Amino acid sequence: MNYNKKTVMDVDVAGKKVLLRCDFNVPMAKDGSGVITDDKRIRAALPTIEYLLGQGAAVIACSHMGKPVATFDSYVKKQTEKGKDPATITEEKWRKSLAELSLAPVAKRLSELLGREVIMAADVVGEDAKAKAAALQPGQVLLLENTRFEKGETKNDPKLAKAMADMAEVYVSDAFGAVHRAHASTAGVADYLPAVSGFLIQKELDFIGGALANPKRPLVAILGGSKVSSKIGVINNLLEIADTVIIGGGMAYTFSAAKGGKIGNSLFEADWQDYANEMVAKAAAKGVKLLLPVDTVCGDKFAPDAAVQTVEAGCIPDGWEGLDIGPKTVELYCAAVKDAGTVIWNGPMGVFEFAAFAKGTEAVAEALSKTDAITIIGGGDSAAAVQQLGYADKMTHISTGGGASLEFMEGKELPGVACLLDK
C-alpha cells in the first residue's frame, strides 16, 4: 500500500467547503444524560479543523457514533433476535435509541474547544443538512448528524456518498479509527471529490507506515491480547520485517500448548496450535527472534482476588490459569526492547485490569518509556494501559485506531487511505 498521500497542506481550501471525516465516536455516560466521558477523539481533530479554518475554509464535519439501527424494521428484527417480545418493541424505543447516539453533545463540546459556534444539522443529507451546508460561510463549522443514521453508510451506498460530496468541494479524511472500513463517509465520497488526509491520518501513516516500510533497526514487535486467531495476519506480516517478535497475553498459552506444555485452565485455541508451530518454524527460517514466556503468573480463578502463584511456562497446574507473564519473562522482554531502534506494541501482557496480574504490562510500558527507540503503541488496550500508567507522554506515537492499526500492521489495504490522492 502506498503511504505517501496528499494532505490538507497540498490543496487550496481557501473559500471552499471542506467535508471533513472525523472520529467523534466518543464514550458517553450510560445514564442517557449526553455527557461525554472522554473527549480525547474530539481534541485529536482540532489541529486539522483549526488549520482549515485558518486557511479560510468552511468545514462540514461528519462522523459515526456507536452502532445505531437505521430503520425501525431492522430494529424490530435485531431486538427479536435478542429474545425481546415483539409486542414490547415500539417505534418510540427505537427513536430513543437513536437520540442517545446523536452527535449533538459532540457539537456542544467542539464549540467549547474551538471557541466558536459549531452549527448542528438535524440529519446527514436531508433538507436541514443541505440548507445549512449551502449557507455555510468561510470560518464556520457545521457538524452533520451521525452518519450511521443513514442505512447506506455502512454499505458504501454511492447515492449517499454523492449526496454528502455534493455539499462540499474537497474531502479530508482524518478518522484513522474508521479507515479500515469501506463506508460512504470514509471511502465512497472520494469518488466524487479530491480527497486528502488530515494531520491525524498523516501522523499515523508517517509513524506506523514508516515503521513497517523503513524502520530504524532493530525492529521489535510486542504482541499481546487474548487470541492468536485475532493476530494471525499481524504475526505473519511482522515475521517478514521485524528483528524480534515478542508474544504475551492469552495467546501465549496456545503457543505453549502447541509445544506440549501444560496450561491448566488458561485461554486456549486448540484449532490454532498448528499455526503457532508454523510461526515458530517461520521465525527460525527467517532468522527472527520469537520470544515466548518462560514463566507465568497464575490465578486459581479469573478474578482480582484470585490466589496467585508463579510457575515455569508449560507447567501450569490443573485448575489454575495463566493471567500474566512472570518475572523472568519480564526481564527477558524488557532486555529485548532496551537497545531497539523501533518498538511496535499491540496488546497487553496479561489481565492488567486486575492489579495482581498487571505487572507484566506495567513493566513493558515502563521499559518503553525509558528506551531511546521510536515507540509506537497500536491503539486499543495497550494504548489504554500506557495512558492509565502515566507513560503516554513518553511514547513517540499512540495510534488512535485499534482495529485500523491492527489491519495496517497486517499489511492489509485500508480503504479509507487507499482512496486518497497520491503525492
Image (cartoon, grey):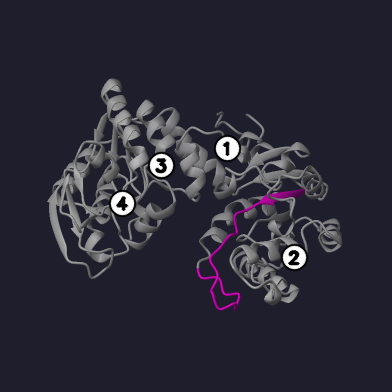
Considering the image in quadrants, where does the N terminus appear? Answer: top right
Q: Find disc 2 in the rendering and name its residue.
A: 72
Q: Nearer the viewer, mark 1 or mark 3?
A: 3
**Which of the 4 quarters of the picture holds residue 74?**
bottom right
Mark 2: secondary structure = helix
Considering the image in quadrants, where does the C terminus appear? Answer: top right
Q: How far apart are marks 1 and 4 (CA)?
A: 30 Å
Name which of mark 1 and mark 3 comes first in the sequence.
3
Disc 1 residue type?
A: Leu
Please indicate whether residue 2 sits to the left or right of residue 268 in the image. right
Please indicate whether residue 46 sits to the left or right of residue 258 in the image. right
Instruction: Tell me the crowding category of disc 1: few under 14, some 14 to 19, or many 20 or more residues within 10 angstroms, Cα based.
Output: many
Disc 4 residue type?
A: Leu
Instruction: Tell me the crowding category of disc 4: few under 14, some 14 to 19, or many 20 or more residues within 10 angstroms, Cα based.
Output: some
Magenta residue span: 17-37
Q: Residue at x 30, y 22 (%)?
A: 286
Name which of mark 3 and mark 2 comes first in the sequence.
2
Q: Where is residue 100 in the image (x, y as percent from the top left)?
A: 64, 71
Q: Distance between the residues labelled 3 and 2?
A: 35 Å
Disc 3 residue type?
A: Ser
Q: Which residue is drawn at 38% across and 59% down?
A: 387
